[in-house]
């Protein structure tokens, strides 16, 4: 839990992920999604959170091991950040697939 708290305090992207997660949960509640849709949303949220936490761990470990500038350190950090990007793309795709149709139905009903 300490690591999660550290990331929340020190990583602006973690706070963005928290806010996005809250919005997703609120929208899903408002749309009264079935349990199988919640499973997909939670898997997407978890994927982003896990990769962001691992990215933070890699960045801090690399900073400790290689305080100076080094090409391999940059590659490690960029690769970890790339994992967050992939997880975020997955989350967006899941969000569009799961939330898109009911949101569209809601908009049409207005």
Image: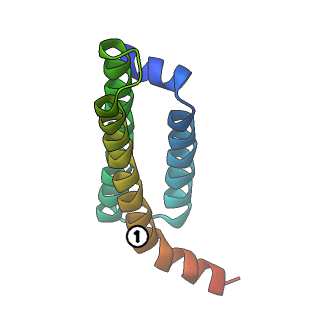
Q: Residue at x 52, y 66 (%)?
A: 31
Q: How far from the left and from the top, in percent, is residue 9? A: 55, 20
Give the residue at x 39% y 28%: 56
**Does the rendering let one see residue 1?**
no
Which of the pair 89/82 is nearer the observer?
A: 82
- The quarter of the rendered structure image containing the C terminus is bottom right
Can you name the residue that lies furthest to the right here?
110
Q: Which residue is under mark 1?
A: 98
Does residue 39 appear anywhere in the picture? Answer: yes
Asked if 68 appears above or below 110 in the picture, the reply is: above
Q: Quadrant of residue 22?
A: top right
Query: Which element carries disc 1, helix, strand or loop?
Result: helix
Q: Is residue 64 above or below residue 58?
A: above
Q: Is residue 19 left or right of residue 71?
A: right
Horizontal side of residue 9 vs 69, given as left or right: right
Measured as percent of width and height from the top left, residue 64 is found at 34, 12
Residue at the (56%, 81%) spot, across then down: 104
């Amino acid at each position: 839990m300490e690591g999660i708290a550290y990331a929340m305090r020190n990583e602006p992207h973690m706070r963005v992920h928290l806010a996005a997660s809250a919005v997703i949960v609120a929208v899903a509640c408002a749309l009264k999604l079935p349990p199988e849709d919640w499973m997909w949303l939670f898997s997407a949220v978890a994927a982003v959170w896990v990769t962001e936490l691992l990215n933070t761990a890699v960045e801090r470990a690399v900073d400790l091991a290689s305080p100076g500038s080094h090409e391999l350190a940059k590659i490690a950090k960029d690769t970890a950040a790339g994992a967050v990007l992939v997880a975020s793309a997955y989350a967006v795709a899941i969000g569009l697939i799961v939330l898109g149709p009911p949101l569209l139905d809601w908009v049409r009903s207005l």
